[in-house]
Image: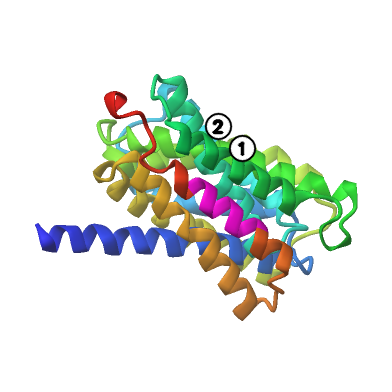
């Protein structure tokens, strides 16, 4: 049992590293114009679909569409947002909305939160508002758009997480489902190429391929192998480590500053979400 728990912990840590890696790779590729959002999204999904092609398990069907659309919405919003957001603040907004989405869907399904859970949601929302506020770091009101795009990506990833947790019984299991989602999503985002005004440089395309193959396709397969073995609250708490890793990685590898606004807002978001963990009413668990 201890060995099994250790394997699960290691796989979860590997998944978190992959999630943070996606933020770092996207910011590195998009920040200096090496590639634009349309090409980055298309290459990321197409390369992921290509490496997963041998594991399809079955032909894509209508039942795969919800997962594919959620994945496409996440990747599109993620890429467009990272044209302007730093890796750390982007991951902070992303996973703040991921957890809010998971909790909201849980409530809609009949799970009730105790007062501590509602308090946590209010605190986390306050942190997000603080991070996105136009007055933070002299940001203009127009700068809210990248934050809103990342918030939309977070909601899409929250839905994708819940869909993926239940994909084990599908043909080919979690790996087969992930392969089909990537294949369909790569078609869905293809029109984004029309948004680009320049051809991608080789280094930008390479970073998109690494993101698609390693930190996305293989990272998601690892995540959906381990996620069904974790409780929903644990799934939420594990992903909360991602913004911390991304922020540290951004400071170390991309020379991004850790502003006081991000630190304060991040503390509010992570602290608020932490209060919501295991905050379901006892008789609903």
- The disc placed on residue 246 is none
Q: Residue at x 70, y 74 (%)?
A: 256
Q: How many circles with numbers are drawn on the protein?
A: 2
Name the chief secondary structure element in magenta. helix
- Image quarter of the N terminus: bottom left
- What is the magenta range? 265-273
Left or right for 40, reference 117: right
Per the image, label 1 sits on a secondary structure element best described as helix
Task: Please state which of residues 36 and 100 is positioned toward the viewer in this rendering.
Answer: 100
- Image quarter of the C terminus: top left
Per the image, label 2 sits on a secondary structure element best described as helix
Left or right for 259, reference 119: right
Furthest-front residue in this view: 115
Q: Are marks 1 and 2 in contact (CB under 8 Å)?
A: yes
Above or below residue 36? Residue 281 is above
Q: Which residue is denoted by mark 2 in the rendering? A: 69
Q: Residue at x 31, y 24 (%)?
A: 284
User: Residue 246 at what x, y percent from top left?
Assistant: 56, 66
Scheme of image coloration? rainbow
Q: CA distance from mark 1 to mark 2?
A: 6 Å
Task: Please state which of residues 9 and 276 is positioned toward the viewer in this rendering.
Answer: 276
Q: Which residue is denoted by mark 1 in the rendering? A: 73
Task: Please state which of residues 256 and 64 is positioned toward the viewer in this rendering.
Answer: 256
User: Residue 16 at what x, y percent from top left?
Assistant: 43, 60
Above or below residue 45? Residue 202 is below
């Amino acid at each position: 049992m201890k060995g099994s728990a250790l394997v699960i912990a290691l796989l979860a840590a590997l998944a978190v590293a992959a999630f943070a890696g996606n933020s770092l790779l996207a910011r590195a590729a998009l920040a200096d114009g090496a590639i634009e959002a349309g090409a980055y999204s298309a290459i990321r999904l197409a390369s992921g679909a290509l490496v997963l092609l041998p594991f399809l398990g079955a032909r894509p069907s209508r039942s795969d569409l919800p997962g594919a659309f959620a994945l496409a919405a996440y990747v599109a919003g993620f890429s467009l947002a990272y044209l302007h957001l730093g890796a750390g603040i982007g991951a902070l907004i992303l996973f703040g909305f991921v957890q809010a989405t998971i909790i909201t869907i849980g409530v809609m399904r009949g799970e009730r939160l105790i007062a501590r859970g509602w308090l946590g949601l209010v605190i986390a929302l306050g942190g997000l508002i603080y991070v996105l506020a136009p007055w933070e770091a002299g940001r203009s009101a127009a700068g809210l758009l990248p934050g809103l795009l990342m918030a939309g990506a977070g909601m899409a990833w929250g839905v994708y997480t819940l869909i993926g947790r239940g994909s084990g019984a599908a043909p080919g299991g979690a790996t087969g489902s992930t392969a089909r989602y990537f294949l369909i999503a790569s078609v869905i985002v293809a029109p984004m190429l029309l948004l680009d005004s320049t051809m991608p440089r080789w280094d930008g395309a390479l970073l998109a391929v690494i993101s698609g193959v390693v930190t996305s396709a293989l990272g998601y397969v690892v995540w959906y192998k381990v996620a069904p073995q974790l409780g929903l609250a644990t799934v939420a708490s594990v992903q909360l480590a991602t913004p911390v890793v991304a922020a540290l990685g951004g400071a170390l590898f991309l020379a991004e500053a850790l502003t006081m606004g991000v630190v304060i807002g991040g503390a509010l978001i992570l602290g608020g979400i932490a209060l919501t963990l295991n905050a379901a009413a006892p008789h609903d668990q």
